[in-house]
Image (spheres, helix red, strand yellow):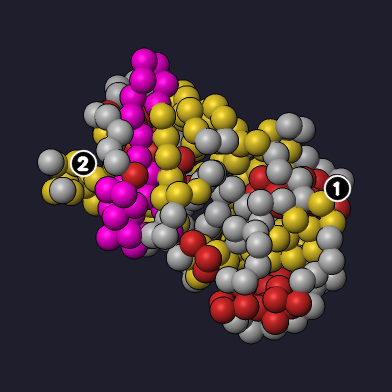
Amino acid sequence: MRIPIYQIDAFTNELFKGNPAAVCPLNGWLRDDILQNIAAENNLSETAFFVKKGDEYELRWFTPKGEVDLCGHATLASAYVICTYLVEDIKNVKFNTKSGMLEVSKDDGQYILNFPSREGEKCEAPEELIKGLGKTPIEVYMSRDYLAVFDTEDDILSLELNMNELKKLDGLGVIVTAKGKEVDFVSRFFAPKVGIEEDPVTGSAHCTLVPYWKKRLNKTELVALQLSDRGGKLYCTDLGETIRISGEAVSYLKGYIYV
């Protein structure tokens, strides 16, 4: 069997920056173990698979170690592949996912995602979180992921990470954040439990970050920077029940998988 594969750098307009995602259009769903093996072989933070159903697309995301319920950069990358390679003159793509219906629109090179808001609930910092980050956050919240808030951007850059401790946490991943020097806020994201020690740019994390910073800064339109080595800038708007996230994308490769 020959399966098309595209690798897209998302949340950037520059090759080798942002977050790389693999995207595999399918004619029909394959067994889950085959999808998981492909994602493990790709060894990127996410591989997206989609199947066209009428005017919509069924979309799933896999890390090297398991399926996840929401992924921003691989959704953007999937929309980019559809708009760039598969369908002419399309401006709006609808994805049916485990997180409900997600829409991505294209506007002058920007891809605009509408994702569900996931505001965290305040909680105590687990011991594993403090040991895993190497310092104590000023606040901690829990949604799908832990959200650990620090005082400064320098705190985010100087964490002394222990991935074995972070793997013990019950959430999927850990978001760390602080007020930015040149943007509204900065963040990093870690999910060693599902095979991602540090994700370069994490759209889904901003479903929790944006509601927090909306309240903290008293504004609904926010510019965010993820402080990974590759880096990525996101333009976010809090719409209440949904979060709008905008970014660009560029192609790295196009080819085939043989399974």
Residue shown at 27%/34% (left/top)?
A: 26
Q: CA distance from mark 1 to mark 2?
A: 43 Å
Label 1, secondary structure: give it. Answer: helix
Give the residue at x 80% y 63%: 140
Hey, what amino acid is under mark 1?
A: Lys
Q: Could you say which disc has been placed on residue 119 in the image?
A: none
Dot 2 amino acid type: Pro
Q: Nearer the viewer, mark 1 or mark 2?
A: 2
Q: Is residue 222 above or below residue 44?
A: above
Q: Quadrant of residue 51?
A: top left
Indicate yes or no whether the magenta region holds residue 183. no
Residue depicted at 33% across the width and 24% down the height: 52
Q: Is residue 56 magenta?
A: yes
Q: Position of residue 127 (x, y in %)?
A: 76, 77
Drawn side of residue 4 relative to residue 48, left or right: left
In this rendering, would 114 be left or right of 49? right
Q: Residue at x 30, y 33 (%)?
A: 29
**Sequence order check: which comes first, mark 1 or mark 2?**
2
| Residue 89 position by quadrant | top left
Q: Which residues are magenta?
A: 33-57
**Where the N terminus falls, by quadrant?**
top left
Q: Is residue 128 above or below residue 259?
A: below
Q: Confirm whether residue 138 shows in the render.
A: yes
**Which residue position holds label 1?**
215
Label 2 SS: strand
Report the disc number at residue 4: 2
Local packing at callout 2 (Cα closer than 10 Å; few below 14, some 14-19, many 20+) is: few
Percent position of residue 204, x then y: 59, 48
Can you give x and y, in whole percent of width and height, for residue 205 in the image?
Answer: 62, 52
